[in-house]
C-alpha cells in the first residue's frame, strides 16, 4: 500500500468543510419571562448553547443564537411579564418578525446564494409555558394560534411540571388541547433526583425530540440531531443510514477506475473524513485533543493492514458479491464494503465513548477504545453480518 501519513491530512480544514455542509434548522423559542426557555434549550442541546452569551439582536425583542460548531440556530423571544406593558407588544413583535422571515424566505435567492431562502425560514416553533403559573394565558393562546395560522409547526413545551399535582396538570393539558390545538410535551429540569424519579412516567423529552425531528425537512435533520446533547441512539441511526452511505458512495466512485492495491491509499482520506464526520455527530470532536494522531494513525494503519490481509484472501470471502479471483484491483464493491465496515467500526467505538463520557460521566483513555484490535474486530463483525444478512 502506498505510504500515507496522518500529517498529509488537514484535519481542521476537513472539520470546517463538514460543518459548512450541514444545513442548520432555525427554531423559534417563545414564551413568557420565567417560562423556562433557557432550561429547555440547555437540557436538549447542552451547556454549549448557554455559553453563547448574549444573542445577536435581529429585530426588537428577538435575538439570534448560534455557534459555528453547533447544528441549530435558535431565535429567542424576549418574553413578557403578565401585567406589564410588554405583554401588549409581545404578539406584535413576534408576528412582525415572522412576517419578515417569510418575506426573506420567499424572496428569490441570488445566483451565488442558492441556500438563502432555506436559511431564512423558521422551521419550527417551541412555545414554552410554565406549569408553575397553573394556567394558559390569553396571550399564549393568541400567539400560538397566530403561528399556526402561518402554517408553522408549533409544539408547546410544558415546563416545570413538578409544580403541579395530577389534577392541576390535567387541567392545563385540557386548556392547551382545547384552545391551542397543538401537540404538547411535559418537561422538568429539577435538580432533585427523587423528583425526576417521581415524574418519570410523565416526562416527555424523548417525545419532544421525536416531534422536532419529524417536523423538519430531511435535509435539516442531521444538523438538529448532531446538536442534541444526548440521544445517542438517534445519532447512531443517522450515522448508519445517512453519513456512512455518503462515504461508501464516494469510495465506490474512486474505485470506478480500477485502482491497484498499491494505490489504495486513495480510499484513506475518504475514511478519515468519514471518521471525523462520525465523531462530530457524537460531539467527540470537542473532546479529542489530538485528532491527527488518534484518528489518522489508527485509520491509516488499519486500512493498510486490513487491505493487505484482504488481499491475502480471507476477508474477500466475507464481502457479498466478491469472489476470490479478484486479482489486485479494488473494485467498487470492495471499496464501498471496506469503507462501510470501517464506518461501522468507528461509529460503534464512538458510540461507546460517547456513552461513557456523556451519559456515565467517565474519564476514559481514548486509546482503550480507538485501537487496531477493536477496529479489526468490529470490521470483521460487519463483514460477517453483511454476508449472512
Image (spheres, helix red, strand yellow):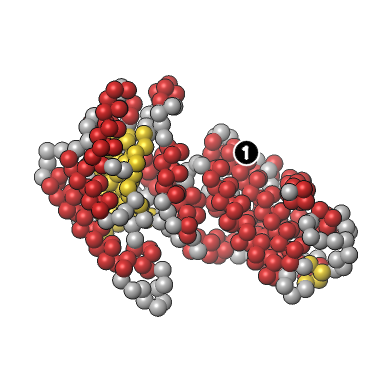
Tell me if residue 305 can be seen: no
Q: Helix, strand, or loop for circle 1?
A: loop
- 6 left or right of 51 in image: right
Quadrant of image for the N terminus: bottom right
Above or below, 143 relative to 325: above
The residue pinned by badge 1 equals: 364
Task: Locate residue 118, reporting x and y percent.
Answer: 38, 64
Please tell me in which quadrant of the rendered image residue 164 appears.
Answer: top left
**29 vs 107, nearest the viewer:** 107
Can see residue 360?
yes
Residue ID at (32%, 35%): 159
Please name whichever residue, 150 or 328, is drawn nearer the observer in this view of the structure.
150
Residue displayed at 66% across by 45% down: 349
Q: Is residue 231 above or below residue 303?
A: above
Q: Which residue is pictured at 31% across the width and 68% down the height?
A: 106
Residue 42 x/y as whole percent: 39, 41
Relative to residue 119, is residue 255 drawn left or right? right
Whole-percent x, y for residue 160 in the image: 32, 31
Q: Quadrant of residue 138?
A: top left
Residue under the point 15% across and 44% down: 87
- Count of numbered circles in the view: 1
Give coordinates of residue 171: x percent, y percent.
26, 28
Amino acid at each position: 500500500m502506498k505510504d500515507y501519513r496522518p500529517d498529509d491530512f488537514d484535519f481542521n480544514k476537513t472539520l470546517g468543510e463538514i460543518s459548512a455542509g450541514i444545513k442548520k434548522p432555525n427554531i423559534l423559542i417563545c414564551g413568557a419571562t420565567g417560562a423556562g426557555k433557557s432550561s429547555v434549550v440547555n437540557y436538549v442541546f447542552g451547556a454549549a448553547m448557554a455559553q453563547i452569551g448574549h444573542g445577536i439582536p435581529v429585530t426588537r425583542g428577538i435575538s439570534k443564537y448560534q455557534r459555528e460548531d453547533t447544528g441549530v440556530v435558535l431565535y429567542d423571544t424576549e418574553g413578557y411579564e403578565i401585567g406589564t406593558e410588554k405583554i401588549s407588544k409581545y404578539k406584535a413583535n413576534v408576528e412582525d418578525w415572522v412576517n419578515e422571515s417569510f418575506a426573506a424566505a420567499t424572496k428569490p435567492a441570488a445566483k451565488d446564494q442558492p441556500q438563502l431562502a432555506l436559511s431564512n425560514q423558521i422551521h419550527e416553533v417551541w412555545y414554552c409555558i410554565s406549569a408553575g403559573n397553573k394556567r394558559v394565558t390569553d396571550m399564549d393562546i393568541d400567539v400560538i394560534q397566530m403561528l399556526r395560522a402561518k402554517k408553522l409547526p408549533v409544539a408547546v413545551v410544558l415546563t416545570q411540571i413538578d409544580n403541579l399535582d395530577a389534577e392541576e396538570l390535567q387541567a392545563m393539558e385540557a386548556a392547551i388541547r382545547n384552545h391551542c390545538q397543538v401537540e404538547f410535551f411535559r418537561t422538568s429540569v429539577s435538580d432533585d433526583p427523587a423528583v425526576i424519579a417521581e415524574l418519570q412516567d410523565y416526562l416527555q423529552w424523548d417525545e419532544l425530540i421525536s416531534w422536532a425531528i419529524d417536523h423538519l425537512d430531511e435535509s435539516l435533520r442531521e444538523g438538529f440531531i448532531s446538536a442534541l446533547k444526548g440521544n445517542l441512539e438517534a445519532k447512531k441511526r443517522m450515522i448508519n443510514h445517512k453519513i456512512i452511505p455518503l462515504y461508501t458512495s464516494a469510495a465506490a466512485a474512486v474505485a470506478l477506475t480500477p485502482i491497484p492495491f498499491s494505490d489504495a491509499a486513495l480510499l484513506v482520506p475518504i475514511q478519515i473524513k468519514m471518521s471525523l464526520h462520525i465523531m462530530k455527530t457524537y460531539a467527540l470532536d470537542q473532546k479529542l485533543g489530538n485528532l491527527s494522531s488518534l484518528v489518522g494513525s489508527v485509520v491509516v494503519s488499519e486500512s493498510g493492514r486490513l487491505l493487505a490481509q484482504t488481499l491475502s484472501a480471507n476477508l474477500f470471502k466475507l464481502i457479498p458479491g466478491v469472489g476470490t479471483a479478484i486479482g489486485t484491483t479494488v473494485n467498487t464493491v470492495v471499496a464501498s464494503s471496506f469503507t462501510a465496515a470501517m464506518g461501522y467500526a468507528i461509529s460503534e467505538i464512538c458510540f461507546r465513548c460517547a456513552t461513557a463520557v456523556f451519559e456515565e460521566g467517565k474519564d476514559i483513555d481514548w486509546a482503550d477504545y480507538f485501537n487496531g484490535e477493536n477496529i479489526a474486530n468490529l470490521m470483521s463483525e460487519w463483514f460477517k453480518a453483511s454476508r449472512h444478512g
